[in-house]
């Protein structure tokens, strides 16, 4: 009798745990992903001639850093965590999904930084553009898509 109760309890816990995993909303993100980084730098300045006439000029640089198509998203230990690896050799980063969905934004350096995640796309602003005029600045963001 004792053995039957123990088997019943173990079976119930196994089924409960399996069903709980199947209903996990984070499962739609799990899998192989590809990520790329986009950078932009701007520097504007005046050039003066001998008569002190000025002309505004600027330098712009666009960069794109492609990863090796070996990024991934995995389940975290806690029920609201996912783990993102931007590439095979990259350190994993833990993201907390909030109660409002799969995004988190905040003010940093006067601009919005944060990330958003759907079941097939990821976007993160790492370095925002300045909130007002600046003669020189850089921005950086990360884009991802599920493979």
Image (cartoon, rainbow, N blue to C red):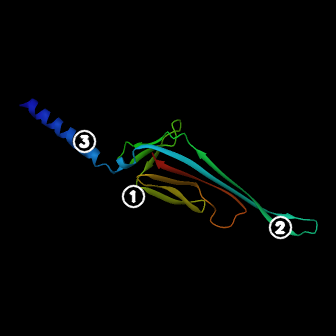
Report how far apart the C-alphas of labels 1 and 2 lie in the structure.
48 Å
The mark found on residue 55 in the picture is 2
Position of residue 74 measured from the top left corner of the image (x, y, whole percent)? 41, 42
Of the two numbered discs 3 and 2 on the same chain, state the one appearing first in sequence.
Answer: 3
Marks 3 & 1, CB-CB < 8 Å contact: no
Estimate the x, y position of residue 87 in percent, counting from the top left: 52, 40
* Mark 2 Cα-neighbour bin, 10 Å: few <14, some 14–19, many ≥20: few
Q: Which mark's residue is nearer the viewer, 3 or 2?
A: 2
Residue at left offset 60%, top offset 59%? 109
| Cα distance in 3D space between marks 3 and 1 | 24 Å
Does residue 27 appear to the left or right of 137 in the view shown?
left
Q: Quadrant of the N terminus?
A: top left
Answer with left or right where residue 116 lies relative to residue 132: left
Residue at x-position 60% and y-position 58%: 128
Q: In the rendered image, which residue does mark 3 sit on?
A: 18
Disc 2 secondary structure class: strand
- The residue furthest front is 147
State the residue in front, 109 or 90: 90
Q: Where is residue 51? Give x, y as percent.
A: 93, 69
Residue 69 x, y percent position in the rendering: 51, 41
The residue where tag 1 is placed is 101
In the image, residue 51 sits, relative to residue 22, either above or below, namely below
Residue 134 location, quadrant: bottom right
The residue under the point 13% across, 33% down is 7
Helix, strand or loop status at disc 3: helix
Tell me if 64 is positioned left or right of 13 in this view.
Answer: right
Circle nearer the N terminus (3, 1): 3
C-beta proximity under 8 Å, tags 3 and 2: no
Q: Quick one: SS at disc 1?
A: loop
- Give the answer, above or below, for where 47 lies relative to 92: below
């Amino acid at each position: 009798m004792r053995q039957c109760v123990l088997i019943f309890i173990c079976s119930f816990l196994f089924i409960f745990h399996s069903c709980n995993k199947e209903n996990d909303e984070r499962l739609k993100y799990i899998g192989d992903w590809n990520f790329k980084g986009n950078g932009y730098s701007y520097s504007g300045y005046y050039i003066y001639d001998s008569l002190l006439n000025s002309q505004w000029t600027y330098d712009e640089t666009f960069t794109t850093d492609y990863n090796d198509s070996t990024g991934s998203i995995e389940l975290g230990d806690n029920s609201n965590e996912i783990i993102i690896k931007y590439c095979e050799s990259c350190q994993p980063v833990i993201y907390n999904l909030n109660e409002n969905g799969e995004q988190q934004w905040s003010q940093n350096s006067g601009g919005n930084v944060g990330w958003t995640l759907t079941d097939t796309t990821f976007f993160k602003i790492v370095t925002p553009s300045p909130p007002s005029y600046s003669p020189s600045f850089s921005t950086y963001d990360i884009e991802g898509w599920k493979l």
